[in-house]
Image: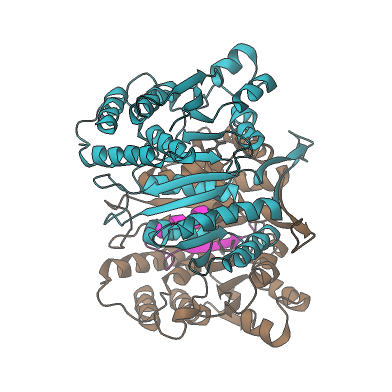
Chain colours: A brown, B cyan
Amino acid sequence: MASGIDLAVIPGDGIGPEVVAEGLKVLRAALPAEAKLETTSYDLGASRWHRTGETLPDAELDRLRSHDAILLGAIGDPTVPSGVLERGLLLKLRFAFDHYVNLRPSRLFPNTPSPLAGRPEIDFVVVREGTEGPYVGNGGSMRTGTPAEVATEVSLNTAYGVERLVRDGFARAAARPARRLTLVHKNNVLVHAGHLWKRTVDRVAEEYPDVQVDYLHVDAATIFLVTQPQRFDVIVTDNLFGDILTDLAAAITGGIGLAASGNINPSGAFPSMFEPVHGSAPDIAGTGKADPTATVLSVALLLRHLGHETEAARIEDAVTADLAERDAESPRTTETIGDALAARVSA
Amino acid sequence: MASGIDLAVIPGDGIGPEVVAEGLKVLRAALPAEAKLETTSYDLGASRWHRTGETLPDAELDRLRSHDAILLGAIGDPTVPSGVLERGLLLKLRFAFDHYVNLRPSRLFPNTPSPLAGRPEIDFVVVREGTEGPYVGNGGSMRTGTPAEVATEVSLNTAYGVERLVRDGFARAAARPARRLTLVHKNNVLVHAGHLWKRTVDRVAEEYPDVQVDYLHVDAATIFLVTQPQRFDVIVTDNLFGDILTDLAAAITGGIGLAASGNINPSGAFPSMFEPVHGSAPDIAGTGKADPTATVLSVALLLRHLGHETEAARIEDAVTADLAERDAESPRTTETIGDALAARVSA
Ligand SMILES: CC(C)[C@H](C(=O)O)[C@@H](O)C(=O)O
Ligand SMILES: CC(C)[C@H](C(=O)O)[C@@H](O)C(=O)O
């Protein structure tokens, strides 16, 4: 940890700035005294758009590119038309910085309430493709607003894009104790994209004889997530299916208040971006009710990505210990949770 | 119930024939003595394909068209390449007979085990579009099998197709006690298709001031399905999202052994088709372990569609009563369950 970290921070909207403040607090506590953390804050999101009409100007994208990594709070506000900030900012970042690995670990921590009866053991990671599929923005509409309107959305999938994601998934599966990988798609209906995924997994699987491989249709996968989540270890899946499965995965592991994510460019050519899965939750912004844990766990993913495994694990242990002592009857504020986690991490 | 019912039956593969036999038994028991039930069985599915290479010849499609309705068991077998029977038979029927309303009720019956802690009340119906979206089969691949492969899947959505489905959903919502309708889509990413859906729902909503309307992204909808399923009454959604949500809905209401569905052409120009949501389950075929209840509930939907509301309700009441007395410790055979339901229905 000699060189320090040059971090871009996008606090964003709603509870974004509040949870990011705690994330940074814990990050500082985790770093050894001699490690330098430099942060640059970027004013992006709903309020910027309301003020200037801008979502992500090219100059800002260029500046963001120079950092080691990006920490993002949450983007969005009901006053902005749906799609404007998602396509113009969030997805633009993922696409511009080639964040093809959208990494979303799901773990049911001890003492965390689960909506599932019997609290099954849950510990898997979704490796969601981040730059292709139905997310590419290749669609349109004609005769819009008339009874003759036609609207399309095109899912684009390439061998290049699928293979690099699948390879990342296998590498992660091989490094985990259970060594299981499940491909989730819908190859009985989306036959062209689905068969590309299936063929790719089958081929790469030959290089990983120790990894046990399985295939599930996305609809069946949702069933197993609630009836038998223990069966999952590493899930590799397309952009849209990954979006759906990871919200469900968050729900069964205590809610999106705990779900972390990384938008990763493994090559290092671009900075990777880490963000909680939850949104800006404008209804509780400013109340101190937001749980910063998802952001703190995203900071752990960030540290791991930058090679600081010890510090990452320290943060995750702190979260585990903190969750074990939580009492649903007496919830703490955003800041109190951040303080407690920072104290544990630096102890 | 003067005229009787001329029913096409597609038993299909695996447990299909077993559950269909019980479905027909209960159907016969529900009909008054003077009502004539005529059934014609069609040999379609995996074994036909293995024998002849055919999935659904045009002549067969023509003959099927002449019936009042179709009862289907289950199609599929691991020995048939993924997609062959789905695209060539199941989806071909839905598309050829313009089954644009894919109706899937979800109810947690008393005494039925649920994977959700606390057994929340669940009683909603998913009105899934059945003839458009990513299911249209508009996709392809180039340079297939090479590192330069590109594969596409196109989601096609029309004002015509979306509006008729949305109208059906509102009519159903207006007729239910709770009168709530939730549109599920992903209009922050799939902006063209999503906005067509949203605009259509907003416009039709003006004609239904008594129906309370809500919008959820598909990822958020999966969260609420496991944390707060009580919030749903009628869900209208696209073909693919409906596929995913209804398997999850089945899982939280006791499993796909109980999930019924109707592929409905409301105009009556074509026969509607009724089928359990579950598949052919080849692993338990012939063991007597298959639960015919999903098929029996599909028969109730069939009767309701043909105007026999009293008989439909009688079947549903019989299922409710039977489920209330089930003992998970001593499971009954397919036939025993069918007999019990038939006895209740004719009592
Ligand atoms: C906000 C939205 C564009 C985004 C997505 O669909 O990927 C979100 O749901 C997520 O999962 O990060
Ligand atoms: C078998 C498959 C084509 C089908 C679908 O995707 O619609 C099934 O999953 C269903 O839900 O009826």
For residue B295, which quarter of the picture? Answer: top left
Residue A160: percent from left, percent from top: 72, 45
Split into 4 quadrants, where in the image is the N terminus of chain B? top left
Residue B340: percent from left, percent from top: 25, 29
Residue A79: percent from left, percent from top: 60, 80
- Of all residues, the one furthest to the top in this rendering is B51
**B25 to the left or right of A46:** left
For residue B329, which quarter of the picture? Answer: top left
- Residue B158 seen from this side: no
Q: Residue at x 77, y 75 (%)?
A: A58
Say if the magenta span includes residue A257: yes
Q: Relative to B267, does residue B334 appear above or below in the rendering?
A: above
Split into 4 quadrants, where in the image is the C terminus of chain B? top left
Between residues B219 and B111, which one lies in front from this camera angle? B111
User: Which quarter of the frame holds ligand 1?
Assistant: bottom right
**A333 to the left or right of B146:** left
The magenta region covers A244-266
Residue B163: percent from left, percent from top: 64, 56
Say if the magenta span includes residue A109: no
Between residues B51 and A142, which one lies in front from this camera angle? A142
Q: Residue at x 33, y 20 (%)?
A: B287
Q: Residue at x 32, y 22 (%)?
A: B288
Q: Relative to A86, does residue A267 appear above or below in the rendering?
A: above
Q: Relative to A110, does residue A126 appear above or below in the rendering?
A: above
Between residues B70 and B246, which one lies in front from this camera angle? B70
- Count every numbered label the image shows and give the total: 0
